[in-house]
Amino acid sequence: MEKNHLARKIIAGIFYSGGILFALFIGFIIFKGNSIFSASDLIFSAICVCMPIVIAAFILIPTMSGIDERLKTARISILIMFAFYIIILANALFYNGMRHFAAVDAIGAARYFKWSINLIPFKTIGKYIRAFISDSINKSIIIENLLGNILIFAPMGVLLPCIFQSLHKFKEFLITMLTILISVEIVQLFTRSGICDIDDVILNLLGAVLFYGLWSTRSVQKVLMKIYVLKNA
C-alpha cells in the first residue's frame, strides 16, 4: 500500500509540474510582451494547464486519509487554475490597451471615448447577426466575437462558486459577476483596450450563468463533492 501511494504521489507530482511549467511558460510569454491571447487561445491554454492539474489531484487525493487534507489539496488545485485563468484573461482583455496607453494624446482620447461606448442592448449583437445573414463579414469573425464573448467568462461560473462559498447562491453570484463585468468594460475603455459595450456584458454574463447552471446541477455537485472540491452538505 505504501509503495502504491508513493507511486501515485510521484505520478501526481509529474502532472502538477507539467501544468505549472506550462503556466509559467505562458506567463513568460505574456510578461515579455510577445503575444495577445484571444478567447480561443485562452481556452486552449486553460485546457493545457488545467487538465494535468485535475489529473494530478485525482491521483493524489485517494492517497490522503484525512478529509481536511483532501479538501485542502483540491482547493489548492482550484486556486492554481483560477490564478492562471486570471492572468490569461487579463492578457486577453487589457494587453493591447496597456501597451499603447502612454502614446494617446488628449484629442485622440476624446475621439476614442466618443465612439467607444455603446449602452444600447443588443445593438452590437444585432449588427453581427445581420452581417451573418447577409454574409457581409467573414462568418468566422462573427462567430469568434459572439461565441468568444460567451466563453471567455464562462469558467467564472464554475470557479467562483467552487472557491467562494458565499457565491453558491445565484443572487450573490449574479451581483458579483455584473460588478466584475461592468468594471472590466470601464477599465477597457479607459485603457483603450476595447469599447465599453453593454452587449459584451450581456454575452459575458450569459456564458458565466450557463456554466453556473451546470455547476449547480445535482450530478455535477455530487462529482465535486466526491473529488473534495466541495464539502458534503
Image: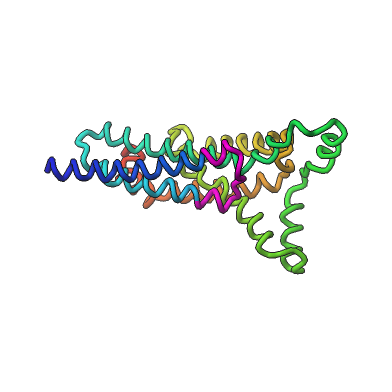
| 85 relative to 188 in the view: left or right | left
Q: Is residue 79 visible?
A: yes
Q: The N terminus lies in which quarter of the figure? A: top left
Query: 175 or 187, which is in the foreground?
Result: 187
The image shows residue 68 at horizontal and vertical percentages of 27, 31
The image shows residue 163 at horizontal and vertical percentages of 43, 35
Dominant secondary-structure state across the stretch colored magenta: helix
The image shows residue 54 at horizontal and vertical percentages of 36, 46
Question: Residue shown at 57%/41% (left/top)?
Answer: 89
Question: Residue shown at 83%/43% (left/top)?
Answer: 115
The image shows residue 156 at horizontal and vertical percentages of 52, 42
Query: 43 or 183, which is in the foreground?
Result: 43
Query: 141 or 66, which is in the foreground?
Result: 141
| 209 relative to 50 in the view: left or right | right
In reply to whether residue 50 is colored magenta, the answer given is: no
Q: Is residue 209 visible?
A: no
Query: 153 or 170, which is in the foreground?
Result: 153
| 155 relative to 112 in the view: left or right | left
Question: Residue shown at 70%/35% (left/top)?
Answer: 186
Number of numbered labels in the structure image: 0
Question: Residue shown at 66%/54% (left/top)?
Answer: 145
* Quarter of the figure with residue 62: top left
* Residue closest to the far right: 107
* Residue closest to the far bottom: 134
In reply to whether residue 33 is colored magenta, the answer given is: yes
Q: Which stretch is magenta?
A: 28-44
